[in-house]
Image (cartoon, rainbow, N blue to C red):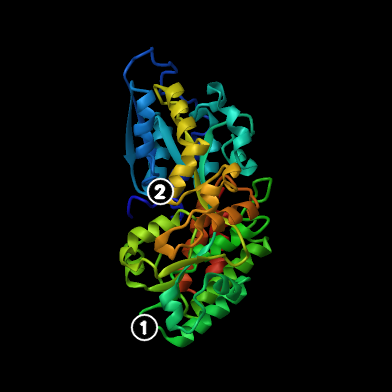
């Protein structure tokens, strides 16, 4: 994985770590001294991230007004970061002053309020009016009484595609015409069949079915859990529909069999191994990094179904922090309206503050790499259309089980029906 990876990687917390997370949820926080620094005292804040969040220029700006603050980033890969955080919370040692948590894991950690500082004690409840309501709610404890995390970005969806590969397949290349090809997922598959029929050398229609499944489920009114935190994979028809359609991509031989965030997947960007990919806002920066020689070949259209969310993060302060007040103040700064706008323009991570969506500097923002696609407008409209979905306490573990099932089908190890039966059995074991 490269430094920018952070928003879409398939969650892979091991079962033992997830059990450990649940077991320590009710334990006391411990580990840190709840004391503010004395005026002028030199202190060091550590920030635990899973990739490059685009914060480094902001740190330098922050230190101009806080010369006594030294900031150090601890950056690890996506899964390692979350797995390590589970361990560090359980042992009351090793957590950073500020920890980033991706949305796929947020419910795992908000179920452990004793392990984190309530940011209300530092006045950050003043920020509630800034945020999308559902994004704010994701950062609250399960009982809703404590503010445990402040949001950074949301992953409003679009579809990125290779114009040059579409042209070779005899398909439209204009982004508005491309969007008209797939108002629904069924029509997306039909477009894929046309692409496959053209037999474009070295290219498949899509990288793999996993993120297509995730996008479809995220568009549904209810996902893997109901409001009472019951897993409803077996009974939710939208989940089964997403499963069936995702596996059609495999059966029609439309996938490149490249698992997201694997080294071959990274190479696939550079080689033009797939023509379309689910594209939350942050993915635009990732594509630029992986496909440096493909400027002008990529473009962006609306996603089938019109909207959806994939990814996004929160910043939290573990009880272990020796400087929780200063850590909370840093979070307030990093997530401010102005700084979310700056990070979007540099990194592509889309703000979770809706007042920015109509800001001309966002609305008129384009990227030459994507043929001057109106990125700000595309993702603003996606974010406005986004409907929140309840996330359950073991969301990540359930997604791993389903992703593994899709992988077995793609690898030819099981039929879709066989894999689905195993998925349902594996899901029953998640308590």
In the rendered image, the vertical position of residue 156 relative to residue 37, given as above or below: below
Residue 326 falls in which quadrant of the image?
A: top left
Does residue 333 appear left or right of residue 184 in this picture? left
**Residue 91 visible within the image:** yes
Q: Specify few, some or many for label 2: CA neighbours under 10 Å numbering under 14, 14-19, or 20 or more.
A: few
Residue at x-position 60% and y-position 44%: 354
In three-dimensional space, the C-alpha distance between marks 2 and 1, rounded to whole angstroms, equals 34 Å
Residue 222 falls in which quadrant of the image?
A: bottom right
At mark 2, the secondary structure is: helix
In the rendered image, the vertical position of residue 297 relative to residue 42, given as above or below: below
**Residue 260 visible within the image:** no
At mark 1, the secondary structure is: loop
Quadrant where the N terminus is found in the figure:
bottom left
In this view, the residue in front, 184 or 411, is: 184
Residue at x-position 55% and y-position 73%: 178
Check disc 2 and report the residue beneath it. Answer: 346
Check disc 1 and report the residue beneath it. Answer: 201
Q: Specify few, some or many for label 1: CA neighbours under 10 Å numbering under 14, 14-19, or 20 or more.
A: few
Report x, y in % for residue 357: 58, 48
Marks 2, 1: nearer the viewer: 2
């Amino acid at each position: 994985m490269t430094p920018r990876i952070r928003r879409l990687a398939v969650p892979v917390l091991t079962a033992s770590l997830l059990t450990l997370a649940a077991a320590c949820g009710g334990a006391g926080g411990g580990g840190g001294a709840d004391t503010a620094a004395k005026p002028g005292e030199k202190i060091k804040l550590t920030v635990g991230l899973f990739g490059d969040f685009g914060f480094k220029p902001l740190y330098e700006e922050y230190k101009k007004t806080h010369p006594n603050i030294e900031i150090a980033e601890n950056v690890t890969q996506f899964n390692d970061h979350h797995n390590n955080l589970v361990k560090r919370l359980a042992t009351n040692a090793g957590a950073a002053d500020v920890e980033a948590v991706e949305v796929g894991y947020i419910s795992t950690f908000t179920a452990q309020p004793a392990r984190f500082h309530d940011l209300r004690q530092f006045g950050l409840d003043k920020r509630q009016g800034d945020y999308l309501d559902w994004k704010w709610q994701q950062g609250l404890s399960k009982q809703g009484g404590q503010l445990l995390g402040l949001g950074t970005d949301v992953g409003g969806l679009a579809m990125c595609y290779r114009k040059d590969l579409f042209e070779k397949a005899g398909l439209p290349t204009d982004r508005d015409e491309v969007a008209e090809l797939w108002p629904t997922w069924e029509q997306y598959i039909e477009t894929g069949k046309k692409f496959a029929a053209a037999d474009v050398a070295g290219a498949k229609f899509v990288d793999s079915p996993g993120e297509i499944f995730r996008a479809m489920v995220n568009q549904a009114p209810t996902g893997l859990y109901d409001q009472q935190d019951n897993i409803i994979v077996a009974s939710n028809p939208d989940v089964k529909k997403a499963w069936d359609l995702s596996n059609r991509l495999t059966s029609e031989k439309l996938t490149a069999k490249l698992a997201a965030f694997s080294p071959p997947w990274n190479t696939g960007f550079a080689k033009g191994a797939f023509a379309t990919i689910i594209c939350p806002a942050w993915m635009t920066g990732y594509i630029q990094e992986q496909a440096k020689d493909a400027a002008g070949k990529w473009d962006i259209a609306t996603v089938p179904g019109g909207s959806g969310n994939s990814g996004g993060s929160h910043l939290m302060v573990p009880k272990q922090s020796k400087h929780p007040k200063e850590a909370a103040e840093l979070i307030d700064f990093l997530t401010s309206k102005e700084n979310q706008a700056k990070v979007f323009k540099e990194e592509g991570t889309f703000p979770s503050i809706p007042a920015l969506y109509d800001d001309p500097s966002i609305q008129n923002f384009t990227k030459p790499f994507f043929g001057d696609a109106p990125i700000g407008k595309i993702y603003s409209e996606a974010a406005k259309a986004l409907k929140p979905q309840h996330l359950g306490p073991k969301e990540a573990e359930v997604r791993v089980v389903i992703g593994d099932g899709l992988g077995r089908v793609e690898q030819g190890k099981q039929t879709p029906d066989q894999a689905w039966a195993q998925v349902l059995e594996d899901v029953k074991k998640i308590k």
